[in-house]
Image: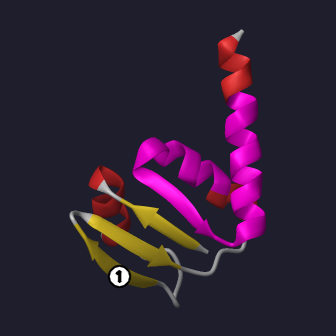
Amino acid sequence: MELELCGWAARFAAERCWSPDQKIKELGHGKILLAFAASSESEVVSWTLWMGEEAKLRKPLRLRKKMIATIENMARQYAS
């Protein structure tokens, strides 16, 4: 998994260990790229949604598409 994080989410993630193989790369302007192995895709989706606009799932593409569909469905629920 790869997440681009900024603001409070970047600070929060940088202080924790998400997996033994995790890698954090500074992107500048308070942004980081967090790469890690995850055993539960649903947890990654929930975690990313919890971070809101401070998080962007980059990889894998399959899960990124699931995130997009989830966000679109949520937007429709709140629009009515």
Residue at the image position 23 percent from the left and 63 percent from the top:
30
Nearest to the observer: residue 67 or residue 40: 67
Q: Is residue 69 above or below residue 23?
A: above
Display coloring: secondary structure
| Residue 17 rendering spot, x and y as whole percentages | 43, 76
Residue at the image position 56 percent from the left and 53 percent from the top:
47
Q: Is residue 8 above or below residue 22?
A: above
Within the magenta stretch, is there residue 23?
no
Q: Is residue 64 left or right of residue 28?
A: right
Q: Which residues are magenta?
A: 45-74
| Residue 45 rendering spot, x and y as whole percentages | 66, 54
Q: Secondary structure at mark 1?
A: strand
Q: Is residue 49 above or below residue 74?
A: below
Residue at the image position 38 percent from the left and 81 percent from the top:
24
Residue at the image position 50 percent from the left and 74 percent from the top:
18
| Residue 49 rendering spot, x and y as whole percentages | 57, 45
Asked if residue 16 can be seen in this view, the reply is no
Check the image and name the residue furthest to the bottom: 21
Neighbourhood count class around disc 1 (C-alpha, 10 Å): few under 14, some 14–19, many 20 upward: few
Residue assigned mark 1: 25
Amino acid type, residue under disc 1 in the picture = Lys
Q: Is residue 13 above or below residue 38?
A: above
Within the magenta stretch, is there residue 51?
yes
- Number of numbered discs on residues: 1
Q: Is residue 34 left or right of residue 57?
A: left
Q: Main secondary structure of the magenta part?
A: helix
